[in-house]
Amino acid sequence: MTENGVHTDPAALDELTEAARHEHAETGADGGVAGYRASRTLGLGVELRRQLRRRRTQLVLGFVVLLPFILVIAFQIGQSNPNRRSGGFVDLATASAPNFVVLALFVSGGFLLPTIIALFFGDTIASEASWSSLKYLLAIPVPRHRVLRQKAIASALLSLLALVLLPLVSLGVGLAWYGAGDAVSPTGDAIPFGQSLLVLAASTVYIVIQLAWVAGLALLLSVSTDAPLGAVGGAVLAAILSQILDQITALGSLRNYLPTHYSYAWIDLIANDIDWTNMAAGVLSAVIYATVLSLLAARRFATKDITS
């Protein structure tokens, strides 16, 4: 929809109009809105429904569901050996359903998952600004801190949905094609199927926490620009740059401070004797980065001059 040369989101404007009508239906003697409560503005359910109706959300979730089937087709076309008990994660992918889930997480962890997080968080505020609806949202009025909080929570829930869907769908597909066998690591350790489910759950939790820094950075970029593509692309490029720098061994111990250095520490869980050192360092690093970036985003949005 185009109005006066500005592209707007019809669903967003309809909801803003409805909210404005509700809030300004009655005016008190002091000129304020009778019955106005900031806590009733921009409900989380409303924001989630808006985001779920967006095409980009549906495409992202659809691709996450489709990815395990694409991997199965690739192995069916190729020459995979379902009885293989040695090799790397790709070689072991068809050994059992747990191994197939490990492969899905492994191949998507470097680019796909950070991109999904960056898309949900980087697009959340910047898209409202690009549609010229952000200033109307704040004029309802919805407090700035509530706008940022509600949109961040909605983005976090959608990101969590995508990150949980991938291993769940992969597990179902893996069970159908490869059966419920042991999870076999490249070092030869074999974990029983029941225990491997706990390992996969813990791995997913770690990945969610580790990617929190991408969410914080994307949110900061989203409140700093009116271009959603710039916010999303900036966060993705930062993740790629960090991965590239992490491959430069000449940096030595400096690589430990890169946000992606411990991205694959969850692999240590696929062992009979688990070493928690890297995972603990990865959680601490991600929490620090995410906290600092989120606080910067909140400060930036609280003081920013909203013109669109």
Image (cartoon, rainbow, N blue to C red):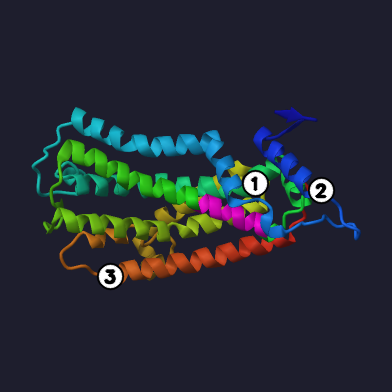
Provide the secondary structure element on which disc 3 rests.
loop
Q: Nearer the viewer, residue 186 or 121?
A: 121
Provide the secondary structure element on which disc 1 rests.
helix
Which disc number belongs to residue 5?
A: none
Residue 271 horizontal/vertical position (percent) = 18, 62
Please give left or right for residue 270 compared with residue 258 in the image. Answer: left
Please give left or right for residue 261 compared with residue 33 in the image. Answer: left
Q: Residue at x 50, y 65 (%)?
A: 289
The mark closer to the camera, 3 or 2, is 2
Q: Magenta segment, principal secondary structure?
A: helix
Q: What whole-number distance in Å separates the C-alpha atoms at marks 1 and 3? A: 38 Å
Check disc 1 and report the residue beneath it. Answer: 126
Q: What whole-number distance in Å separates the C-alpha atoms at marks 2 and 1? A: 26 Å
Residue type, mark 3 in image: Trp
Q: Quadrant of the N terminus?
A: top right
Residue 191 horizontal/vertical position (percent) = 14, 57
Residue interval drawn in magenta: 146-156
- Mark 3 or mark 2, earlier in chain: 2
Q: Residue at x 39, y 67 (%)?
A: 283
Q: Nearer the viewer, residue 233 or 7?
A: 7
- Mark 2 or mark 1, earlier in chain: 2
Q: Residue at x 25, y 41 (%)?
A: 172
Residue type, mark 2 in image: His
Check disc 2 and report the residue beneath it. Answer: 24
Q: What whole-number distance in Å separates the C-alpha atoms at marks 3 and 2? A: 55 Å
Provide the secondary structure element on which disc 2 rests.
loop
